[in-house]
Image: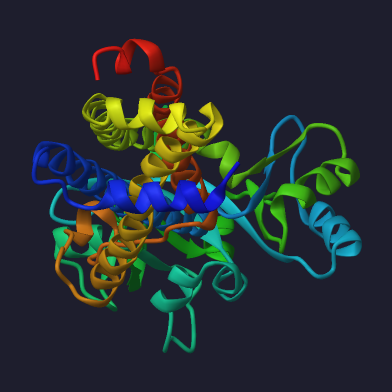
């Protein structure tokens, strides 16, 4: 194949032709469509990834990497010692779980966790921020969520009544456990369900109230929970449950993954529509240059060379659109990261700024997907040009 000849014809066909301006307008529209599609995909995938990471970050903290819980067998101090013996580098926070009702300007139900404040702060940075500056923790001190704290009008140091779901016998009937506790602070996870429905209490105080000498479970921080969960299962006795944070929210993350895939496919249609413009533009050019193509073939140009000319024409337009779209998308992501153009309600999304995190995998899929679409859209017109009938075209010339 004569590469100089192919390059010469490509340069000639890329020039503006006054006789057929609509062909070049179609080329420009195809270029703009591909550029817009790539840029939109990059920004959309970046936002989806950013929101997924933000939700994952929140759920990791409030659900913990790995949780060992009481099932058929009870979790107690011997279980904790066993875990510390085999995995001394992990961080542990044993807890007792109970339902309770806070009586303050009405009744508000909460999931109450009895924890060691110091150990819990080591694996939960949100809780750590909540107790910052608190030097001494009383046996019946509690920390509630910010939404509950604000909606009920609590203040730090206030004593409130807490009603527990566990019943205690009284005379000929039963009565719920009632205890006055002291509010020493509040945490702010950014998720309404947690900030309104979860509270933490000193584990020693909850043990005394519930008369419970075993744990509901143990929250564990590990550097690699996906691998470490199997190691933990092997050393624990039968009847004790183990669950990872990703298993607790499997349906939620499956829905996010499906939504991301659907968005990717829908936005990829922009590139497909732009690719149709490339096909129509190349076909119009082939029809207008039909005599020239036949003449080149009669003078010795091979079908392979003719096919290469129009295949490369389509690829040049498409690759230019991909590069421009990547630059535009990168610029858009930088602008959204740097400036507060879009503000989000923190009580709904957990963040006030738009989180953007475009992964290399998603970027690669966008570029490869766009490239494949452009390649396929250039093949048919190139084959059509190479199949030009020389005798039929030049018969009356």
**Coloration of the structure image:** rainbow
Which image quadrant for residue 20? top left
Q: As displayed, is residue 351 above or below residue 285?
A: below
Residue 121 placement (x, y as % from top left): 55, 73
Residue 169 placement (x, y as % from top left): 47, 35
User: What's the residue at 38%, 48% (across, down)?
Assistant: 10
Q: Is residue 230 left or right of residue 154?
A: right
Q: Is residue 15 visible?
A: yes
Name the foreground residue: 178 vs 245.
Answer: 245
User: What's the residue at 53%, 57% (across, down)?
Assistant: 360
Which image quadrant for residue 356? bottom left
Q: Is residue 164 left or right of residue 63?
A: left
Q: How many marks?
A: 0
Q: Quadrant of the N terminus?
A: top right
User: What's the residue at 59%, 76% (across, down)?
Assistant: 118
Q: Is residue 48 visible?
A: no
Name the foreground residue: 305 vs 333.
Answer: 305
Residue 135 placement (x, y as % from top left): 48, 89
Name the foreground residue: 141 vs 260.
Answer: 260
Residue 311 placement (x, y as % from top left): 44, 36
Name the foreground residue: 147 vs 168.
Answer: 147
Q: As displayed, is residue 150 above or below residue 14?
A: below
Q: As displayed, is residue 203 above or below residue 103?
A: below
Q: Quadrant of the C terminus?
A: top left
């Amino acid at each position: 194949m004569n590469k100089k000849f192919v390059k010469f014809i490509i340069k000639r066909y890329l020039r503006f032709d006054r006789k057929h301006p609509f062909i070049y307008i179609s080329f420009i529209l195809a270029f703009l469509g591909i550029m817009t599609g790539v840029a939109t995909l990059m920004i959309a995938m970046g936002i989806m990834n950013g929101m997924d990471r933000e939700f994952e970050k929140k759920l990791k903290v409030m659900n913990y990497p790995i949780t060992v819980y009481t099932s058929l067998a009870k979790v107690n101090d011997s279980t904790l010692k066993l875990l510390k013996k085999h995995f001394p580098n992990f961080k542990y926070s044993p807890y007792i779980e109970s339902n309770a009702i806070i009586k303050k300007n009405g009744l508000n139900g909460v999931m109450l966790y009895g924890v060691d404040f110091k150990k819990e702060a080591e694996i939960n940075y949100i809780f750590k921020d909540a107790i910052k500056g608190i030097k001494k923790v009383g046996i019946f001190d509690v920390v509630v969520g910010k939404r509950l704290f604000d909606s009920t009008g609590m203040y730090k140091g206030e004593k409130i009544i807490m009603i527990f779901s566990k019943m205690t016998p009284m005379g000929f009937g039963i009565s719920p456990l009632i205890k006055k506790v002291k509010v020493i602070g509040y945490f702010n996870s950014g998720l309404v369900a947690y900030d309104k429905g979860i509270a933490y209490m000193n584990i020693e105080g909850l043990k005394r109230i519930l008369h419970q000498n075993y744990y509901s479970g143990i929250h564990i921080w590990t550097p690699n929970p996906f691998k470490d969960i199997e190691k933990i299962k092997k050393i624990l006795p039968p009847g004790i449950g183990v669950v990872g944070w990703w298993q607790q929210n499997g349906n939620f993350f499956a829905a996010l993954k499906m939504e991301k895939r659907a968005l990717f496919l829908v936005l990829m249609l922009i590139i497909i529509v732009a690719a149709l413009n490339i096909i129509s533009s190349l076909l119009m050019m082939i029809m207008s240059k039909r005599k020239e193509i036949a003449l080149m073939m009669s003078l010795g140009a091979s079908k392979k060379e003719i096919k290469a000319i129009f295949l490369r024409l389509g690829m040049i337009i498409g690759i230019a659109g991909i590069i421009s779209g990547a630059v535009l998308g990168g610029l858009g992501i930088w602008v959204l990261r740097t400036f507060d153009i879009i503000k989000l309600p923190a009580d709904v999304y957990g963040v006030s700024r738009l989180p953007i995190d475009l992964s290399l995998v998603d970027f690669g899929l966008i570029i490869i997907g766009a490239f494949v679409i452009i390649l396929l859209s250039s093949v048919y017109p190139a084959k059509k040009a190479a199949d030009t009938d020389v005798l039929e075209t030049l018969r009356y010339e």
